[in-house]
Amino acid sequence: MNKLILLDRDGVINFDSHGYVKTAAEWVAIPGALAGIARLTEAGYLLGICSNQSGVGRGLITQSSLAHIEQKMMRAVQEAGGSIHSILYCEHRPSEACACRKPKPGMLLSAMAELRAKPEDTLFIGDSLSDIQAAKAAGCSAALVRTGNGRRTERQISRSCSIRIANDLYQLSEDLT
């Protein structure tokens, strides 16, 4: 069975924007994130991305723009020495109540099935409460990074919530390898 790390994209790998990252030119990696992905890849983890992208469903981002953003990200990951084995997006608006939009577990369950990983062998790294909730609903472990919305999320979660917390993806990659 495979050891799997699933990542949220915006706020974990790249800087997020309240107006959405709508073009490849607006996609900017968070310092250390690509090196963290490379470190996890080198340690033998399979990596996947599970990210809500409701800007598509809202008509703010075209699927073509999302594909260009993904291409830029994948080039940057590869240039840093990392590998992403799966990318899943939920393009639905929150009002559509789909099964894939976090905090529901659909995307995570699909990624685990695609990459043949058991929930107990999977860690989902995010920056928001919905990421933590999706991980728990999917039966996998959760970790929080303080980048993106992470500092605010850390203040929202209970002290009894037993998850890993790190300043950023690179620090978390050091803890995991």
Image (cartoon, helix red, strand yellow):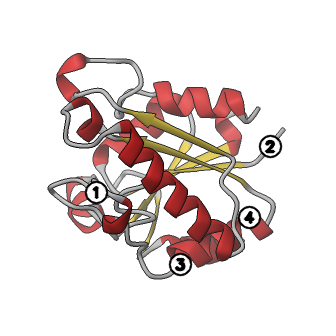
Q: Residue at x 18, y 33 (%)?
A: 58
Say if residue 132 shows up in the picture.
no
What is the quadrant of the C terminus in the image? bottom right
Residue 101: image x %, image y %?
35, 29
Q: Residues within 10 Å of mark 3 (few under 14, many from 20)?
A: some
Q: Residues within 10 Å of mark 4 (few under 14, many from 20)?
A: some
129 sits to left or right of 4? left
- Circle 3: element type: helix
| Label drawn at residue 2 | 2
- Circle 1: element type: loop
Q: Residues within 10 Å of mark 1 (few under 14, many from 20)?
A: many
Residue under circle 1? 21
Residue under circle 3? 171
Q: From what the image shows, is residue 73 above or below residue 129?
A: below
Tell me the amino acid under the disc marked 4.
Thr
Residue under circle 4? 41
Distance CA(mark 2)–CA(mark 1): 31 Å
Of tags 1 and 3, the one toward the viewer is: 1
Contact check, label 2 and label 4, Cβ < 8 Å: no
